[in-house]
Amino acid sequence: MLKKIILSLSILLMLIGCGGDNAYESTESTSTPITPTPTPEVSTQLTKAELGEQLFFDKNLSLTRNTSCSTCHDPDHAFMDTRFKATDANQSIFMHGALSVGDDGVSLGGRNTPTAAYAMFSPEFNATTVVGGQFHDGRAATLKDQAMRPPLDGAEMMMPDEESVIERIKENTEYVTAFKNLYGDTIFEDTEKAYNAMGEAIGNFEKTDLFAPFDSKYDVYVKCKEDGGKTSACLQAGNWSVDEQLGMDLFFSEANTNCASCHQLQNTSEVSGETFSNYKFENIGTPKNLATIKARFDLGQGESEVTDHGGLAQGAADGAIKVPTLRNVAVTGPYMHNGVFADLTTVLEFYEHLRGAGNKAINPETNAPWGETDVEDTINHELLQQGVELTDRKIEALEAFLKTLTDAKYESLIP
């Protein structure tokens, strides 16, 4: 009996001595309440531009989550679409990137995607003067308006409606916090307001210096001039070639060319911040691009839904396209609103053809006549025929000057 009692006490002592870290707690520790550490909330102090930057690169805002704004506006290639550049026979319908492919990998846009670089300087569309806006036809009045369209476009990001886009945004907790910080806690209670906020944020990002550094070879030259340097010294400092200098002289010479009539915003040449567009709309008789699936009758500004054409006669805006910036023009081919020309040289020779040069009747890319345009009646022949016929050497010089308008980041892309 004694042995059983001793054995039972031994087992009890062993049980008391075993257990985890909390098997024994002091009186002091149990008397001190333990306050649980709350789970930290996602917090952000993003600016509207920073939020817009994240949205600009977010592929989740497209139907199959494969397309973002940056897909068609690649920041490594002057904010243009660089896909389908190869001459692969299977890609022939894309005509060296003339049209952008949609989120389904099949659908094509109706026009060549314009660069988003320097787009911030296009003024808000003015229906009275028919100037400004975004897209080739100015149908989006502002950058905000433009940014709201691709997600819902059936040939681009292909989302079914605004609510679907906002639901994708709400999947990201950082977005949710940023939207509430920037637009109020109730922003997601109104889908339309939330969608407008998305457009505003992306538009703010497109107004940052990333899109408009003004650091091209031309800008270096202009800065030298503004600092009081002599023309010869500034050209030498920028290591300008003879052709580049000749091309600049020709570009700004109304007696020789008519380039600056449309591709000059400010009243004098050699000024900083020049975007090389007056943002007006002109019909220059660009040939149809018959190599694309979407070859169609294109009325240009005449089919834009946001204008009354400034009281112009019916049809006066038909075929008119917004004058594009020449910033980065050397690396943003293919050219024209329909991407019909692959090379910048071809564009310059086409202008010579329009001026009436008898030796420029053939498109060097097709070895055939230039082809029919969409709207013949509204071509601005008076504007296009100004200036004098240029020699091949002067055309080469003009192209050399246009290459100096390339941002420093993209100089390596110049053909």
Image (cartoon, grey):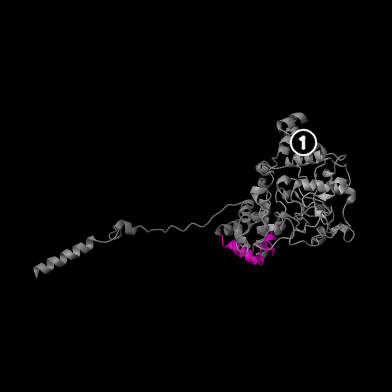
Q: Element at badge 1? A: helix
> Residue 191: image x %, image y %?
65, 65
Q: Which residues are magenta?
A: 147-172
Image position of 151 with respect to 231: above or below: below
Q: Is residue 70 left or right of residue 358?
A: left
User: Looking at the image, which residue sits at the far front?
Assistant: 367
Label 1: few (<14), some or many (≥20) within 10 Å? some
- Please tell me which residue lies in front, 10 or 388: 388
Q: Is residue 259 magenta?
A: no
Q: Amino acid at mark 1?
A: Asp
Write the residue at 47% across / 58% down.
39
Q: Is residue 16 left or right of residue 100?
A: left
Dividing the image into 4 quarters, which one contains the N terminus? bottom left
Say which residue label 1 marks.
243
At x 59% / y 52%, what residue is drawn? 46
Residue 89 spot, x, y in % from top left:
68, 57
Q: Quadrant of the C terminus?
A: top right
